[in-house]
Structures are given as structure tokens and as C-alpha cells.
Image (cartoon, grey):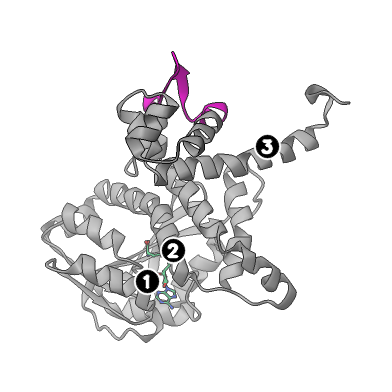
Amino acid sequence: MQNWKSRPAEFRRLWSYSVGFYGVWVGHIGRRMGLFEKISKNSLSPDQLASATGLDRSAVRAWCSAAKSLGFVKQRGGKLAMTGRMKEILLDPSSPQYLGGQFSYLAGRSLGYGGMDELFKSGKTKDMSSSFDAIEQATDWDHYAFLSAVKSNKHLHSLLSEGCRFLDVGCGTGTLIEKLCSAYPHSKFVGVEPSPVAVGKAARMAAGKPVRILKQSGESMDFDEEFDMVYLGESLYAAADKQKVLANCFNALNKTGTIAVVEGLLSDSGTSMEDQLIMGMQIDFALQGHRFLTKKEIRTLLKDAGFSKIRFQNFGGSLFLVTARK
Ligand SMILES: C[S@@+](CC[C@H](N)C(=O)[O-])C[C@H]1O[C@@H](n2cnc3c(N)ncnc32)[C@H](O)[C@@H]1O
């Protein structure tokens, strides 16, 4: 029998991936079932937590001992509690430290990973239409990072504050537009989205707001200098004809307009701990029939579409904001 310390480093590294798998699920279940929410307000014993949430007692007990062992919660005098830092990381989408949404994205997306067999054997991909719940969990992070970047950019902040026309290409369920609408009530928003499932949800959000949602792809847009800003949030990678989408974005902008692209981008080395998530996520994108772009590819695409002043801002975790002017 080998003890833990005598195990090779490679063994311990791979072991930590198995633990990480359960960490993702314990984090996701705690958020989805409202367990963290309850503990974040009051310290509770496992049985009190089961009563307060109305959930199955045995399942909650198992979750509590896992959550304690994995360091999500602390136990004092038989009661579970969360630190302020842990609440921020798991429950506060507007915090730059927020990771909870990522756990929910990973757990939600992995429900479709049964499709990996077919992908690897016959190249059959699965579109993202059944994953909008998971996508919403992940892109909250992008949206708050974008809002904070806009706030600290004098030009973009005053444009939106004074009231501008904003186009969101591949707007999904409209969750960025919803946030922008309340932050910048003088602006007007158009969301373009090809998925009928997402359009249905976005249209419900848009009711009564200065928002129009159109069911179309970026390739089929036909706007003529109607917008001050165009945004593509993790949608360019998904477009079949990226050059056409960017040419349409260029035409949609007025003469001094700005394009903002938020995308996960592959780095050249891909070996740092920060890179490892996007490197692993490549199998998720392959299942969707897509791949991540590199910085070089996105720069070339924007240049070829006629954009200039291309700037990259690192949001962390391989997520970048790329801005350019018409
Ligand atoms: C990862 S989701 C991001 C959604 C949204 N932008 C956000 O930040 O929450 C990618 C979106 O791009 C949309 N999409 C896929 N192909 C597209 C295309 N050719 N033109 C425009 N949008 C597209 C998908 O339907 C999906 O809603």
C-alpha cells in the first residue's frame, strides 16, 4: 500500500481532477437548490437546512458533508456557515471574483457530453440550443466585466449615458441588453439572434423596454450606419461566416462607431493555470462544432473587415474584450 505522500506528483495532479469534478457539482447543486443562499443568511445544521429548503434530508446531509470537505462551507458547533469571500465567489455575479456561474455552466453543459461518443466516432456535433440555461450562468461574468470596462472608458460610458443606439449580435436570451437597459436607460437596443429558443426568451425580457429583438443571424443583417456601438459576446466563434458577420457589423455602425467583441481567446502557450480552463473547454466547443479563435485570427478578421485601432483588454481567465473603431 502506498501512502498519499509517496504517490508521484502526476498521480496527485490527476486525482485533483476527480475531486474538481465533484467540486463543480457540489458548487452547482448548492447554487441551484438554494443551499448556499440559505446558509449565506443564517448558520444552519444540515437538518435545519433540509427543512428550510424543503429538500430531501439524506441528500442534503450528503451535500453538506461534501461541501464541508471541499471547503465551500465551514462547520461551527454543528452549524454550517459561509465566509464573506465564499459568498462573493459563489453568489455575487457582479463581483470580479465570481466563479459560481462557471460551475453551473460546466455542470449544465456536461449533461450533453453523452454526445462525445458520436463526435469522436463520426464527427456529429450538437448545437447549443438546449444549453441556454447553462450559457446564461457563464456569460453573467462576461457581462459584468464588460459593464465595468465601459464604465471606466470615458468615450463609451458617455455615449451610452447620453443615449446611443446599441446592437447586440448573437444576443442569446438578451441578458446583456437587460443589464445595459437598467444601467443606461437613455439608450436604445437591438438584439439579433438566430436561435428561436433564445429569441423567445429575449423577446419576453424586451417587453415594455426600448429594445427590439430580431430573429436573424449576423450573416443576414442588413443595417446601414444605424448604430453607435456593436457588441458580439461569445458569438463570433459560433458564426459560420465570420468575415460576413464583421462586414455587416461594419456597415451597421455610423462613421465613428465602435465594435466590442468579448470572446475567450486561445493563448500561444496554453500551459498556465489560467489557460487550462479554455484548453479543456476546447472539447466542449468541438462538440458544438466550433473552436476558440486566437488573438491573431481576431485581429486579422477585424482588419479585413475595415476596422482600425484594434485594442485587447484581458478580463482574466482567457476572456478578452477586443474593441475597434470604424
Ligand atoms: C455563447 S452564446 C452568447 C449569448 C450572448 N451574446 C451572451 O453574451 O449572453 C452565443 C450566441 O451566439 C448565437 N449565434 C450563433 N451563430 C450565430 C450567428 N451566425 N450570428 C449571430 N449569432 C449567432 C447563438 O445562437 C448564441 O445565442
Mark 1 or 3: the one toward you: 3
The residue identified by callout 3 is 16
Note whether 325 is above or below 249 in the view shown: above
Q: Tell me which numbered mark, 2 or 3, is placed earlier along the sequence.
A: 3
Q: Is residue 226 left or right of 185 when viewed as pictured?
A: right
Q: Is residue 83 magenta?
A: yes
- Kind of residue at disc 3: Ser
Q: Which residues are magenta?
A: 67-85
**Which residue sits furthest top?**
77
Cα distance between the residues tagged 1 and 3: 36 Å
Q: Is residue 257 above or below residue 32?
A: below
Q: Point out the tag, 1 or 3, that comes first from the N-terminus.
A: 3
Q: Position of residue 78 (x, y in %)?
A: 45, 17
The picture places residue 197, in percent across and down from the top left corner, at 36, 74
Relative to the observer, which residue lies in front, 131 or 99?
A: 131
- Whether label 1 lies within 8 Å of ligand 1 gets the answer yes
Which of labels 2 and 3 is toward the front?
3
Q: In the drawing, what numbered circle is on residue 40?
A: none
Is residue 59 a member of the stretch shown in magenta?
A: no
**Three-letter amino acid code at disc 1?**
Gly
Q: Is residue 209 left or right of residue 213?
A: left
- For the residues labelled 2 and 3, say whether their Cβ atoms are less than 8 Å apart: no
Task: Please tell me which of labels 1 and 2 falls first in the chain.
Answer: 1
Identity of the amino acid at label 2?
Answer: Glu
Q: Which residue is mark 2?
A: 234
Residue at 63%, 68% in the rendered image: 115
Where disc 2 sits, the SS reads: loop
Q: Is mark 2 within 8 Å of ligand 1?
A: yes
State the SS at label 1.
loop
